[in-house]
Amino acid sequence: MSILVCGPKSWWFCKSLSQSLGLNGIEAESKRFPDGELYVRLPVDTRGEDVIIAQSMPPNQTESLWELLLMVDAAVNMRSRRITVFAPYIAYSRQDRVFLEGEPISIKVLLQSLSLAGASRLVTIDIHKPASLSYFRGTARNVIPAKTFCELLKRTVGEAIVIAPDKGAIDRANMVGRECGWRTDYLEKTRDRITGEISMKPKKLNVRGENIVIFDDIISSGGTVSRAAEILYEDGAETVYVAAAHALMTDGAIHRITRSGVKKIIAANTLPPKEGVEYIDVSREASEHLE
Ligand code: R5P
């Protein structure tokens, strides 16, 4: 039996996670000192116990991460047996290589820091590139909540084609497609050599008259999925839906996506709820990997 600690950035999912795990989640104490420094405390004796620390990494990402590192250290100081971090959204995952000379590999720094702090197991939801998890020096599990997504998508859409907005997202689209028994495809981005304009085309499928679910890991500005929706409508798609694991939804994202004709935005509850997004609860699927 583990002790579940609900970090300050878990308030919107920790209750249902507690229920899924059959545990009584204990809320970590947290505050900010007048000079801006953060303080956390685990109000439970974890000596000799397995501990699960639940904390996502919404903006302000640095604050979320720092609170998490402090909670892991607090669990180490109490001589906990095994420390598992459940971080449904891992920030900085898109800076996973040096794109321009002089850049850091941010996700490497983040995951190595978690290991150094004392976490030995990590469970997350649909990280941008699963290969990045090799920077974590313990056991790491990436959960794609295809089953939960598919249940809601079938109820909402009926039948559809799942389309990844670029080739990099095809694996997650395939998992959802396989679960629902739907076809999948991805958009190929091309750039006009003279005008510089970007166009996207489904690789092999004709989308005319079809319902489409654009499936991606992250929606931030909404630029990627709204451009994809416009292209799919131009190609004759009937109705376009958007589903993603992480709805960051920065300013204007909802408006941008709605304006492109997207009928509904569905996301996993890995980040704090935003208006205009319908959420699926991934606690049950995640909890299977936390036992
Ligand atoms: C990029 O590689 C990611 O998978 C997402 O497609 C991207 O982060 C979405 O960002 P935005 O909503 O700002 O277009």
Image: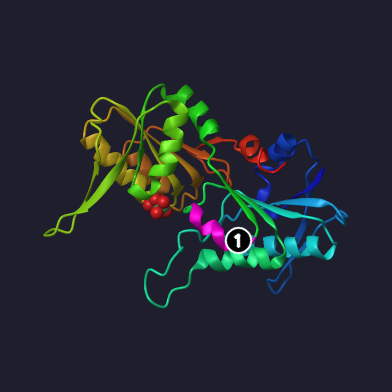
Question: What residue is shown at x 31% (from left), y 39% (from top)?
Answer: 229
Magenta residues, as a range?
A: 130-137
Is residue 291 toward the left or the right of residue 1 in the image? left
Q: Position of residue 14 (x, y in %)?
A: 70, 43
Q: Is residue 184 magenta?
A: no
Most prominent secondary structure in the magenta stretch?
A: helix
Q: Position of residue 22 (x, y in %)?
A: 77, 35
Query: Is 197 located above or below residue 275 in the figure?
Result: below
Q: Which residue is tagged 1?
A: 136
Foreground: 60 or 136? 136
Question: What residue is shown at x 53% (from left), y 44% (from top)?
Answer: 274
Query: Is 109 located above or below residue 236 in the figure?
Result: below
The answer, for residue 282, to whether it is visible in the render is yes
Tell me if the residue at label 1 has its CB under 8 Å from ligand 1. no
Q: Quadrant of residue 114?
A: bottom right
Q: Position of residue 79 (x, y in %)?
A: 85, 61
Q: Quadrant of residue 98?
A: bottom left
Is residue 82 toward the left or the right of residue 269 in the image? right
Crowdedness of circle 1 by 10 Å Cα count: few (<14), some, many (20+)?
many
